[in-house]
Amino acid sequence: MISTYGEAMDYMYAQLPMFHRQGAAAYRKDLHNTIALLDAIGNPQMHIQCIHVAGTNGKGSVSHMIASVLQEKGMKIGLYTSPHYRIFQERIKINGKYITEEFIIDFLNANRLIIEKINPSFFELTVALAFLYFKKEKIDIAVIETGLGGRLDSTNVIVPLLSVITNISFDHSDLLGDTLDKIATEKAGIIKKNVPVLIGRNQKELMPIFNVKAKQENAMIYYANDLVCFSEKKKLDLHSKLEVESIDPLLNFSFSPDLKGIYQIENYLTALAATYVLNNKCNFKLSKKAIKNGLENVTKNANIIGRWQKLKTSRPSFAESAHNEDGIQMLLLQIKSLSYTKLHIILGFVKDKNIDKILDLLPKDAKYYFVAAKIPRALDANELMLKAKEKGLQGKSYSSVKSAFSASQRSRTYGDVVIVTGSIFVVAEIV
């Protein structure tokens, strides 16, 4: 019998294969366990309405944005995202509030025999837990972010009101495919029969993949750039208002985004386009006020962390969850917008990621602090340092993320900027 939240977490972490700790060994390439587990607990996913969000980058931010807008309409919104930064409960929220410890304990105790018979992965179990929680709490809509890919992702048992695919770039190529076409095909697996689908980034070479899949499923397909855009003069300035131009007069307004990363511009566009589809295809009747307020209050409403987050230090320090080529390229745009004397970068990765191209992108004039997060999958800090030196990146390795962060604060001088990045799990130890 599990009596405390600590025991519940110990059980889940110790008993269940967990991707962010073990990598590919924890990845299940079919939906068998998920379906079996959901059958055993009454298929709660069939009793909730959902919006499904996939993509390589931005899917977490877009999920939070959509949830925030729907909350501003006065709805009770479930939000499922992964991985978590600090505590497990971040993955499952209702109107920004974490799932209760009591529900997790009761769920594990009530279903322990089933769990040990089916032996689901950590992610498979978490998906089932989220669906049951949302059903029992009688939410209005759940915004569900995929984990890996889409076609074989455990979340892909739902029939949503809307499917969203943010963008496609290289990540988890060992599992999803070594070309963008293959990765896009996996992500397109969330497109369902007669369910509208929104594509966030217009990548012309991949459009045939999405168009063919949408046609096969008789799914109306939309591209965000066809529905909304921002005035060019405001394109890279998130410190002022963004002015929206849309084919829908309802969306012609300006707003002050509270998520400040330059890369969030694309995510805001995708979320805005999602509101268009929800209104014009799904009859949601979202008001201009709800959409505007939702986009201006994502942090407060949906409780998002780790995205170009300003840290509580006396001088500028930021945490950014960029962890693949596309994410790092967006981070470099952000860095170019800063004014600084010296750049300090605290950097760590997981060991199963191909980092050669990422290291090629990083600035050679920065001072680096190489680290390993406290997870088994973390790439050894000394090994990372040696790989980075081969690419012309100079710095030292540190025994922990926190010791590296402390060293950066001691080493910096007036006008310097510190950035923590490379892995969500590195950022998690700072935010």
Image (cartoon, grey):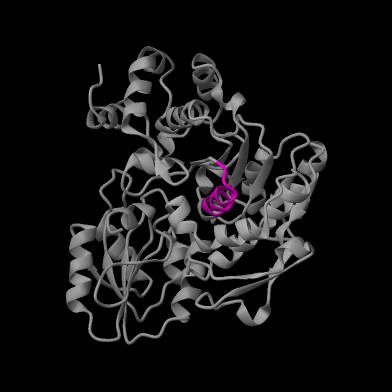
Q: Is residue 189 left or right of residue 333?
A: right
Name the quarter where the N terminus is drawn: top left
- In the rendered image, residue 66 lying in the magenta stretch gets the answer yes
Name the quarter where the C terminus is drawn: bottom left
What count of labels does the image hold? Answer: 0
- Give the image location of residue 380, x and y in percent: 27, 54
Q: Is residue 307 left or right of residue 38?
A: left
Would you say residue 397 is visible in this rendering? Answer: no
Residues 232 and 23: in front is 232
Q: Is residue 232 above or below residue 18?
A: below
Residues 182 and 333: in front is 333
- Give the image location of residue 393, x and y in percent: 34, 73
What secondary structure characterizes most of the magenta part?
helix
Image-quadrant location for residue 90 = top left
Residue pictured at 78% horizontal, 43% vertical: 214
Would you say residue 287 is visible in this rendering? Answer: yes
- In the rendered image, residue 417 lying in the magenta stretch gets the answer no
Q: Is residue 149 left or right of residue 258?
A: right
- Give the image location of residue 381, x and y in percent: 26, 58
Residue pictured at 69% horizontal, 38% vertical: 161
Image-quadrant location for residue 251 = bottom right
- Give the image location of residue 263, x and y in percent: 53, 67
Q: Is residue 412 above or below residue 357?
A: below
The magenta stretch is: 64-75
Q: Is residue 418 left or right of residue 258?
A: left
Image-quadrant location for residue 155 = top right
